[in-house]
Amino acid sequence: MSALALISVIALLIFVHELGHFLAARLQSIHVNRFSIGFGPILWKYQGSRTEYALRALPLGGFVGFPLDDDPNNGFAPNDPDLLQNRPVMDRAIVMSAGVIANLLFAYLVFVIQFASVGIPESFEVQPGVIIPQVMSTTSPAAKAGIKAGDIIFSVNGQPLDQGDENVQTLIDVIQKSPNQPVDFLVKRGKKELNFTVTPDISPEGKPVIGVQLYPNEKVNYKRSNNPIEILKLAAEAFQNVFVRTAQGFLDLATNFSEVSGQVSSPVGIVDQGRTMVDTDFTSLFRFTALISVNLAIINILPLPALDGGQLAFLLVEALTGKPLPRRIQESVMQTGLLLFLGLGGMLIARDISRLEIFQNVFQ
């Protein structure tokens, strides 16, 4: 059930992103002839009075289509002022950036809904075990052993981690006393208990590490709030925290790609990691939704081909030079970028499928 919920969340975020583009165009009276969720063959479509709405076979994104002035079948005069390419640069920039803005606003709204419905975090109760919120790399000792984000370590070398606030430090001490020596973990994943043996590596700083983040296993107690100002303020703080940490992650990826590239996941990997989190605490679905929405916004604003940032880069060139790049060049760059992204996405999906527990069990 949690996997289905997470897939639905990703589909919703794609819809929100494309809806941002769509509304930004419609509110400026710009012609829109297609609104599509997914790529590839059409599974379902509805032809409205001005726009075709469609669901397509590959749920890896979506697009909003605009009629071209050089298409004789578009039904509009080439000099129609409501064709997108006939609008001023600023109008087009608003349309291209609206998807990113929609995802950021939606992430904030998710926190508002969480605090208004579930409640505001009031206190934290430390429970037995240590949570692994993130596995730092696919080549880390923990990842090689099979440990995943969302796992909870309940014992190390037979020693229960039931000492409250000292659990994390106890686990760190055992790891650091075991350089290149196997360490046994009892892990809870959802409703299952699993045993793993991990051999710590030596970090560049000379310390034994297993390549994961460690957090106390805290149960959050919520309180209801009837103060909308408090809810909006706390939601803004939560959104800021997620945005800053996500942006820092992308900066690390750009400046230290070789070490953190293993953290990049396909939609399959994202759903699998999120499923583990939600199985442990269903309220984490709110944070997961906000986190993926912020990720989608930042990815799309990057000045890369086939992304909104790439389109904005073309508009910046046009604003600086006074004329657009030839359409043939723009289309070649965007098509090449799309092929590269689809290829990269395919490789990531194949890699993440091969890591799924159900897939691994077939070949054991």
Image (cartoon, grey):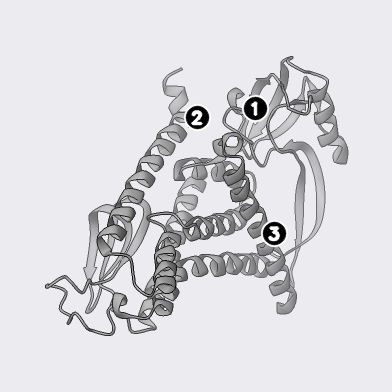
Q: Can residue 279 be seen? A: no
Residue assigned mark 2: 357
Q: Which mark is residue 142?
A: 1
Amino acid type shown at disc 1: Ala
> In terms of sequence position, does the residue under pointer 3 or pointer 2 come before the other?
3
Q: Nearer the viewer, mark 2 or mark 1?
A: 1
Q: Secondary structure at mark 3?
A: helix
Amino acid type shown at disc 3: Asn
Q: Quadrant of residue 345?
A: top left
Q: Nearer the viewer, mark 3 or mark 2?
A: 3
Residue at x-position 40% and y-position 34%: 350
Q: Residues within 10 Å of mark 3 (few under 14, many from 20)?
A: few
- Marks 2/1: CA distance? 15 Å
Residue assigned mark 3: 241
Q: Secondary structure at mark 1?
A: helix
- Marks 3/2: CA distance? 32 Å
